[in-house]
């Protein structure tokens, strides 16, 4: 049962996953582009490489001979996964899934063209001229995103022709890897957005967590709450869409499937738009660390990876999360090596029905996510109140270089 697992990407989500895997008796080698990454601090071994260097990635696999490879970030030479899978190594969820979902072009075309899921109208652009043409095609306002990025990096909204060049430059700056291409999509007038955590398992039993609502700022999530209130028929539609796309990609694990939801009006049905998909635990899913369900998203992922069946996902209580960021005014991380200092922990712990997690990132930079605050209440408790409670905790804890 004990497996040797290479984790590619060792941030805060990877750290929680390593803890879940350790509790199931596994051996983890945490890999990232910098030393002392959060997951490295709890894994048995660690390696520092550029994961976009295919030769370096091959060397790590040859050195450790893992049973399982789990990608946790986008900036990886995912095309190498097919060869690893051919060697008998389990890639999570699968080589096809990891390769497709690390690039917005592949996953969007799969969803919109092959599976015919409802999405926003979109175009691709690999130059400023193509972006200008794409904006004209989808109309304004519209959203521009790098084809390869995470946590909203490089994402912006174009509201006038004057915004196009800045959006192009910002998109390239936020792109992970060496891919200089963006997607421009029509801005949907949605009422809210959700993450539907979807668990695919070796026994063929696909399960869904209660939907998670979230709010973004600067392209990154700020608060999330579970469950998000939504009409049962819209939730069922989202589940069917999530089931279709995860089945097409194949493999086992937790998936963060994002949707835009437009409520129905005047007796008309609402609309569910497929947005994005991540083949791994989702940042908005950190709300599950507050025991909103019987297994956190990280525990679900670990069990699916190891082939340990989960019979049901039980909603235990309502919850919310709020990020704790480094301040905007903090100096660049290169000027402040060493672990940051947190204050206000005792005061935050005095706030009832709350908790927090510090990620132990070794450096800070403006707006870097350094910790998360959690709040929880009984089933039926008001989600906005729980978000406010989580915000009280996040506002109490301060981060300094």
Image: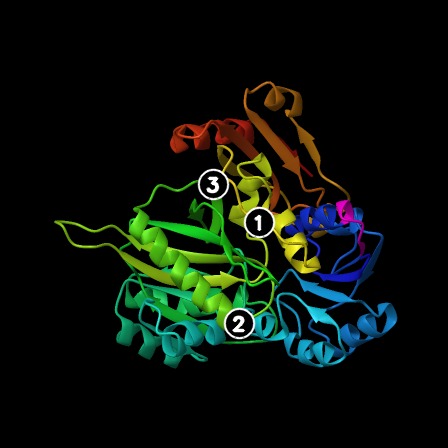
Tell me the residue that label 1 is attached to. Answer: 311
- Range of magenta residues: 22-27
In space, the residues marked 2 and 3 are separated at their CA atoms by 29 Å
| Residue 37 in view of the camera | no
Residue 291 % position (x, y) = 57, 35
Mark 3 lies on residue: 223
Residue annotated with mark 2? 249
Residue in the image at 66% along x and 45% along y: 364
Could you say where residue 92 lies in the image, as x and y percent from the top left? 65, 65
Between label 1 and label 3, give the one nearer the viewer: 1
Identify the residue at the far left of this view.
266
Q: Nearer the viewer, mark 2 or mark 3?
A: 2
Q: Are marks 2 and 1 in contact (CB under 8 Å)?
A: no
Q: Residue at x 39, y 63 (%)?
A: 241
Work out whether residue 150 or residue 354 is closer to the camera in this orientation and state it: 354
Quadrant of the frame with the C terminus:
top right
């Amino acid at each position: 049962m004990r497996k040797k697992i290479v984790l590619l990407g060792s941030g805060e989500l990877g750290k929680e996953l390593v803890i879940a895997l350790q509790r199931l008796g596994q051996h983890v080698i945490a890999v990232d582009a910098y030393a002392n990454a959060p997951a490295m601090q709890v894994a048995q071994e660690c390696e520092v490489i550029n994961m976009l260097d295919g030769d370096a990635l091959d060397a790590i696999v040859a050195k450790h001979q893992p049973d399982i490879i789990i990608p946790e970030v986008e900036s990886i030479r995912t095309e190498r996964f097919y060869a690893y899978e051919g060697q008998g190594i389990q890639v999570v969820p699968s080589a096809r899934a990891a390769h497709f979902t690390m690039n917005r072009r592949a996953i969007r075309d799969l969803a919109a063209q092959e599976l015919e899921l409802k999405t926003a109208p979109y175009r691709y652009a690999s130059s400023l001229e193509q972006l200008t043409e794409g904006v004209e095609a989808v109309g304004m306002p519209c959203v521009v995103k790098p084809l390869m990025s995470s946590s909203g990096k490089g994402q912006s909204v174009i509201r006038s022709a004057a915004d196009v060049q800045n959006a192009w430059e910002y998109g390239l700056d936020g792109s992970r890897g060496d891919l200089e291409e963006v997607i421009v999509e029509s801005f949907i007038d949605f009422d809210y957005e959700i993450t539907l955590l979807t668990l695919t398992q070796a026994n063929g039993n696909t399960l869904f967590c209660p939907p998670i609502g979230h709010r973004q700022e600067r392209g990154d999530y700020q608060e999330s709450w579970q469950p998000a209130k939504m009409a049962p028929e819209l939730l069922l539609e989202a589940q069917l869409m999530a089931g279709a796309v995860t089945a097409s990609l194949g493999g086992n694990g937790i998936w963060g499937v994002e949707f835009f939801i437009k409520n129905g009006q005047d007796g008309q049905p609402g609309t569910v738009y497929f947005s994005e998909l991540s083949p791994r635990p989702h940042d908005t899913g950190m709300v599950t660390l507050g025991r909103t369900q019987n297994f956190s998203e990280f525990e679900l992922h670990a069990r699916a990876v190891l082939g340990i069946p989960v019979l049901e996902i039980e909603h235990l209580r309502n919850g919310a999360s709020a990020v704790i960021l480094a301040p905007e005014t903090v100096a660049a991380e290169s000027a402040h090596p060493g672990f940051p200092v947190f204050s206000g922990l005792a005061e935050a712990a005095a706030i009832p029905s709350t908790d927090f997690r510090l990620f132990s990132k070794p450096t800070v930079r403006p707006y870097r996510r350094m910790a998360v605050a959690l709040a929880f209440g009984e089933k039926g408790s008001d989600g906005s109140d729980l978000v406010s409670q989580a915000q009280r905790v996040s506002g109490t804890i301060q981060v300094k270089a």
